[in-house]
Image (cartoon, grey):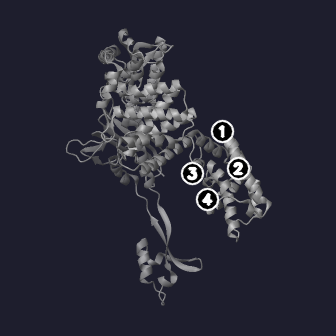
Amino acid sequence: MTTKPLLLEIGLEELPARFVATSRLQLEERIEKWLNGKDLNYESIMSYATPRRLAVVVTGLAEKQPDQKGESKGPAKKIALDEGGNWTKAAQGFARGQGVSTDDLTFKEVKGVDYVFAKTFAAGSYTTTLLPELKEVITSLTFGKNMRWNTYELRFARPIRWLVALYGSEVVPFSITDIETSNQTYGHRFLGSRLEITHPEDYVNRLADDYVVADAKKRKQMIRDQVRVLENKHDWVVPIDEDLLEEITNLVEYPTALAGSFDTTFLDLPKEVLITTMREHQRYFPVEEKNGTLLPQFITVRNGNAHALENVAKGNEKVLRARLADAAFFYAEDQKRTIEDAVAKLDAIVFHEDIGTTGEKVQRTKELVTKIAQHLKVDRTTAATATRAAEIAKFDLTTHMVGEFPELQGRMGEEYALKAGEDPAVANAIFEHYLPRFAGDETPKAPAGAVLSIADKIDTIASCFAIELIPTGSQDPYALRRQATGIVQILLAWKLPIKIETLVDEALRSIERKGFMKASVEDTKKALGEFFASRLKHVFMEKGHRYDAVDAVLASPHVDVYTLFSKSELLTNKAGEGSFKRSVEALSRVTNLAEKSGGTAAVSETYFENQQESDLLAAAVQVESALQQAWSVGDAYAAFRVLAECEEVIHAFFDTTMVMAEDEAVRKNRLALLERLAVSIRSFADFRQLVFA
């Protein structure tokens, strides 16, 4: 079958950088789905994106759909023919429905009964007649933010300025708003011109000749290579922030890296301030010496060629000078106020209208730090450090610098605290209480930072749940999922012997005293339990644990997070072992029958009728002691081994003992015996949740 390539390009006013990559993927996925839905065969799909265009090139696209041949089953023969052997209305209607005449009907036997069959044929449509439907594919694209322009009803990320749709060398005709498809595209906004694309496979090269690099991966590599050239030329070290690199890639069509400089007096500012100013305001890469000292240089990327780069550098230097002057002013002004003055201003900052001020949150966090420190039995120095840090942890929110650069919260708190003469451990805890800030971020390295971070995060989460501000679907305005995940990660990293339920209880007690709870304590506690269970499952599975292993340990009585993790890890690692499956079957048999006991009766040896009952009781007693010893050193493998060693005793018991005996006293005693062992088994996991192939 003849094939041709397809080109579809949407020309736009400049897209926000954050839209470019996701929009490219979305267009590619929707084109692929449309082609598959239309049963159109093709070889490959390549997608391209710059700030001014989204494009797809499909190679080897078939000229028409395959013809569809089939066979349809109709009514039974006895219904299709009357007594005279003539076609009935039922048969005639079936034939019409299949687009054939009754002369084309045949009979076939199916399971001993003759049925009418009709051979069907549907010619495939030509691709050229289907391609105009791509208009609907384009207009169905969704974006984080849409806009309307002129008097058009269409809502799109940015106004559409041109459309290219070519199948081979033939233009696919359709229009969106008042823009009609053609083979005319545009090169670089300033360096390029209007271009005619005569064939889809020429698209990338024609744009490249007109200063447009359509492939984002190639643009990114060009930037990386150009930065390395400057780095090697000047013997610099240029740490490339991957998020910044991605953003710059999606801001330019033809990247050219260049270097600039700034006054050395600005190096008196904290390194983080300089880097943040360059990155957030100007999208510059900072430059360092090999020992990590910041240099008074930067690297930026121009959207254009290398013509008159010295003028471009001067312009960027002028803008950066003004930005850094502002930062220097903020830095100096912030240090004119005491920490106590800054803390007092927190009472005027509303955290949430139903929760109260940030100042009130600070007080709750301080109370929680004290409670958590007591539960963890931390030393006096750590407790005092965490308490002092809790009192002033949010003071930098009232500073000019954090007002300008919110991402510096914590960093500036640490910097200003040190300059104000605070203990370095307190200053460090101020920064660390924000950790981890995002997926893959580090957790606090000092115990005071860990305690304060947990206290701050559990107060935020519990407060929001208390006023029924609970994450749903994609809605999580206070990033509660991220903060809950952070708590789990800290508890894991530090192997802290505290239950999440304990943290929840302490937070809710404090909140209840403040009187702003909308839901009952029990309902809020239940909702928080379910919320944290989902976060635990998320974290454990990200670390490679099996879903059923996680479900099994979460269905058991909750202990501290590290112990839960250890149990889940063990179940995941042992899942493929045959002996493990046999042990699980034995343990599950105990817990299944134990459910009938009611869980309250004591075991009496008076009702024992065989040695196997005595052996099972002895095993249950031994397991209780051995489990306690295993968990005292946090050894999940030893704990499971204790349970697995009961396998033979369990099988012997069931082989010789009728649990559901007719004698009620004997029956209840045997169920109570199983329940005693089941308590220990369930303390590890609900093994019935495990799935074996």
Tell which tag, 4 or 2, sits nearer the viewer.
Answer: 4
Sequence-first disc among 4 and 2: 2
Name the outermost residue toward the bottom: 83
Q: Amino acid at mark 1?
A: Ser
On the question of residue 615 being in view, the answer is yes
Which residue is farthest left? 151
Count of numbered badges drawn on the protein: 4
Gap between marks 4 and 3 measured at Cα? 20 Å
Separation (CA) of disc 4 from disc 2: 30 Å
Q: Is residue 441 visible?
A: no
Choose between 121 and 656: the one closer to the eye: 656
- Where is residue 586 shown, x and y percent of the image? 70, 56
Is disc 2 surrounded by few (<14), some (14 to 19) or many (20+) residues within 10 Å? some
Residue wearing tag 1: 632
3 or 1: mark nearer the eye: 1
Q: Position of residue 588 (x, y in %)?
A: 66, 56
Which residue is at a point 47% across and 16% down the rendered structure image? 231
Read off the residue under disc 2. 580
**On screen, 660 above or below 544?**
below
